[in-house]
Image: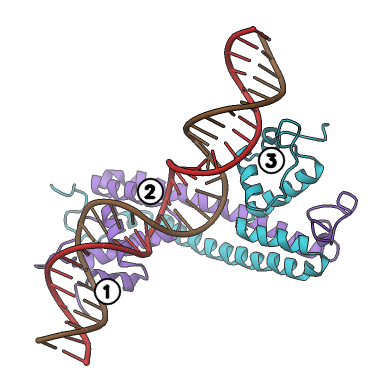
Chain colours: A purple, B cyan, C red, D brown
Amino acid sequence: MKDFYSVGETAKMFGIAASALRYYESEGLLEPVAKNESGRRVYGPKELRRIRFIVTLRDAGIPVEGIRQYVDLFYAGAETIPERKQILIDHLDRLRQEAEHLNELIAQLEQMISTYEDTFMKREMDSRKADPDYGTKPGS
Amino acid sequence: MKDFYSVGETAKMFGIAASALRYYESEGLLEPVAKNESGRRVYGPKELRRIRFIVTLRDAGIPVEGIRQYVDLFYAGAETIPERKQILIDHLDRLRQEAEHLNELIAQLEQMISTYEDTFMKREMDSRKADPDYGTKPGS
DNA sequence: TCTTTACTTAAAGTTCACTTTAAATATTAC
DNA sequence: GTAATATTTAAAGTGAACTTTAAGTAAAGA
C-alpha cells in the first residue's frame, strides 16, 4: 500500500501509542525520524522494520535501556555481532529462569488450591490453635 | 528459639526490608502489630505465619491490593472460603497464561539466536538492500 | 559513658515505561 | 468555511511497591 505513514498510523499498525513511538525516538531506540514540510514525522519502510524489531524485543521483556545498547552496537558495525548475540542469549537465560520460577509458583498455588482443598482455608494464615477467633471478625 | 522478634530481625528472616513490613501493615495486609513499652514493634508466631503467607502470595505475583482483599475476606469469616479459593484459582490462571506467553517468547528468542545464527544479525533491523550503510557508523 | 545501631513517624523520593497535558499549528471531514 | 481530529514540543504526571529521608527516641556494645 502506502510507503509512508504518520505517527498515528504507524502506532496503530503495531498496536502501540503514538507517544510510545516518540518516546522510543527520544530514548535513542529509533534514529531521529524524518519530518515533512510541516514538521510531522514520516515513517518509511526502514522505520517500520526497526519498530517491528523494537516491539519484538520489548515484548520479550528486554528493557528500553537494553535495546538502546543493542542499537548502539548495531551502529558500531559488524564487529559487534557477537556482543549483540550475547545480549540475546543472556536475555534468553533470564527468560528461562523466569519460566522455571513461574512453574514453581504454579505448582505451589496448585498445592494451595487442591491438596488442602477442604482444610487449607481454615489454616492458611493461622491455625485454629493459634487463632481461636478464626471465623469471626477481628473485634468480635 | 525466641518467640518474639524486632522488625529488623523479622525482615531478615523473610529476606525483605523492615520498611516493607511497615508498608504491609500500613496497607492492611497485616493487623496493627503490637508494640513494646518503648513503642517498638514486636512480631510473634502469629505475625510470622501471616508474613510468610503474604510473602508467598507476593512472590507468586499477587498484587498488594489483591492480598488485602484476601485478608479482608479472611476476617469476614469461614463463609468467604469459596471466594478466597476463587482468588487463588484466578491467579493460577493468570500464572499459566503468563507461562505460556513466556514459552512463546523463549521460542522466538531461540529462533532469533539459532535459526539465523550466521545471517540474522546482518538483517535484524534492516536488510542490506534497504540499508546500504550497514556496518558503518550513522554519519560515515 | 559514649557512640553506634535500631527503631519510630509522616512524607517525599525512586524506578520504569510510558502517558497526559498544554499550547500551538496543521490537516481532514463535512 | 468551519469544526473536529491529528500533530508538534517540553514537561509534568502515572502506578505499583516499596525505599529513603528527616528528626527524634531508645537500646546495645565497648
Name the amino acid, label 2: Gly
Residue A27 lies, in percent from the top left, at 29, 51
Q: Chain of mark 2?
A: A
For image coordinates 58% across by 56% down, the residue present is A99
Q: Nearer the viewer, mark 2 or mark 1?
A: 1
Q: Quadrant of residue A117?
A: bottom right
In 3D space, how far apart are the residues under numbered discs 3 and 1 (Cα atoms)?
Answer: 49 Å
State whether discs 3 and 2 lie on one chain. no
Q: Which mark is residue A66?
A: 2
Q: Nearer the viewer, mark 3 or mark 1?
A: 3
Q: Tag 1: Cα neighbours inside 10 Å, few (<14), some, or many (≥20)?
A: some
In the rendered image, the vertical position of residue B61 relative to residue B35, given as above or below: below
Q: Nearer the viewer, mark 3 or mark 2?
A: 3
Q: Which mark is residue A121?
A: none
Left or right of residue B120, residue B30 in this image? right
Q: Quadrant of residue B82?
A: bottom right
Q: Chain of mark 3?
A: B
Give the structural element (helix, strand or loop) at label 1.
helix
Q: Chain of mark 1?
A: A
Give the structural element (helix, strand or loop) at label 3.
helix
What residue would you read off at disc 3? B14
Quadrant of image for the N terminus of chain A = bottom left
Q: Are marks 2 and 1 in contact (CB under 8 Å)?
A: no
Return the residue nearer the eye: A41 or D22.
D22
Quadrant of image for the C terminus of chain A = bottom right
Q: Tag 3: Cα neighbours inside 10 Å, few (<14), some, or many (≥20)?
A: some
Residue B84 shows in this picture: yes
Name the amino acid, label 3: Phe
What residue would you read off at disc 1? A9
